[in-house]
Image (spheres, rainbow, N blue to C red):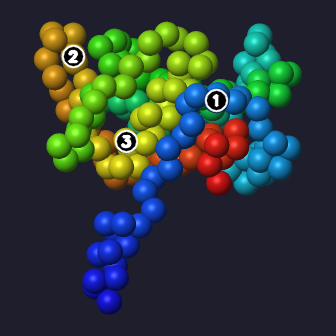
Amino acid sequence: MTGIVLLYIVFGPKAKQIDIKSINFHSTESAELYFKNIRSFSYEREENSDAQFILYRIKSREKDTLVPTINFMIVSNWLQDENYIIVETQPEQLLDKGLMWVKDENEGVIKLKTRDTEAHYVFSALFYEQLTGESDFFYIDENGESRHLIFSEDQRKSLKKTLKDYYKLVGKIR
């Protein structure tokens, strides 16, 4: 039995990659209903009346402003029938030099090149892939030093839930 479990871990399904070449902000009516009627209760809801957006931030996110962290906000642009994912960091300049990740002998950098919705979409998709792969994350602080960005198990779960909810909403994962 142990052998079967080990084989599944090694050769079993890996975290799905999200296609960043075909960016889509639209969702199906059923995905929209599922999010609003089931998943939205896990989120704090804020209405931005100027832009006519509805902002969703997961309740279980890290809220301590003294802890360097990354969170994601789901933005519903109901007038255009679109949904966006926005990266929120503490401190704001956390991603100025990119976010480095390390997993075993592999490493890389995820950058938020611009502040438009497509850049946030690509960043969050790449981050989700590394997060579900249990990578470690690092950032460059204001002194130019590399710092470990530590996520508790609860923070990882919260980040995964938000990103999974968003990519389900726009039809990129099931």
Write down the quadrant of residue 141 in the picture.
top left
Residue at the image position 22 percent from the left and 18 percent from the top: 140
Q: Is residue 94 left or right of residue 20?
A: left
Residue at which label 1 appears: 22
Q: Amino acid at mark 2?
A: Asp
What is the three-letter code of the residue carrying label 3?
Answer: Gln
Q: Which percent across, then down, holds residue 136? A: 25, 41
Residue position marked by numbered label 2 in the rendering: 141
Residue 130: image tag: 3
Q: Is residue 97 visible?
A: yes
Residue 138 position within the rendered picture, expressed as x and y whole percent measured from the top left: 24, 30
Mark 3 vs mark 1: in front: 1
Q: Mark 1 and mark 3 in contact (Cβ < 8 Å)?
A: no
Q: Residues within 10 Å of mark 3 (few under 14, many from 20)?
A: many
Q: Amino acid at mark 1?
A: Ser
Q: Is residue 40 visible?
A: no
Residue at horizontal 41%, vertical 67%?
A: 12
**Between 47 and 73, which is closer to the camera in this rendering?**
73
Q: Residue 146: horizontal and vertical position, in percent?
A: 16, 23
**How many other residues sit within 10 Å of disc 2, few (<14), some (14-19) or many (≥20)?**
some
